[in-house]
Image: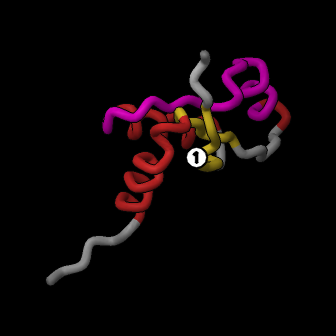
Amino acid sequence: MAEKWVVLMEAANDIEADIICGFLEDKGIPARKADSSPYSGAMRVIGGSALEVQVLVPHNFLEQAERVIRDFNEPETDS
């Protein structure tokens, strides 16, 4: 049975999606862009379209990935 991938978030563009995927993978969380076609990515650049790129993770990693992203986005507080 194939592993089900689910949407974690939408990135503003391919570069941001690549950075997010790399960050998650560094934390041991498999991640990929929903749109892996190089032609679609090129069309966004050529056409100037600002379509978001979905970042996917395996369903069983979703909670961990959400926590990692949330922790990254929360500013540190000085105690």
Q: Quadrant of residue 30?
A: top left
Q: Position of residue 72 (x, y in %)?
A: 36, 58
Count the labels in the image: 1
Disc 1: which residue: 8
Q: Residue furthest left?
A: 79
Q: Is residue 41 above or below residue 62?
A: above
Name the residue located 55 percent from the left edge and 43 percent from the top edge. 16
Q: Position of residue 17 (x, y in %)?
A: 56, 39
Residue 76: percent from left, percent from top: 27, 72
Q: Nearer the viewer, residue 14 or 73?
A: 73
Residue drawn at x 45%, y 39% is: 61
Considering the image in quadrants, where does the C terminus appear?
A: bottom left
The secondary structure type at the circle numbered 1 is strand
Amino acid type at mark 1: Leu
Q: Is residue 36 left or right of residue 61?
A: right
The answer to whether residue 10 of the structure is visible from this angle is yes
Which sits in the foreground, 9 or 38?
Answer: 9
Q: Quadrant of the N terminus?
A: top right
**Residue furthest right in the image:** 47
Residue 35 in the magenta stretch? The answer is: yes
**Residue 3 picture location, percent across and down:** 57, 24
Q: How is the image coloured?
A: secondary structure
Magenta residues span 26-45
Q: Is residue 64 above or below residue 57?
A: below
Tell whether 29 sits left or right of 52.
left
Residue 19 visible, this angle: no
- For the residue pair 42 and 10, the one nearer the viewer reads as 10
Query: Residue 53 lies in magenta, yes or no?
Result: no
For image coordinates 72% across by 27% down, the residue present is 41
Using residue 42 as the reference point, say whether residue 5 is left or right of it: left
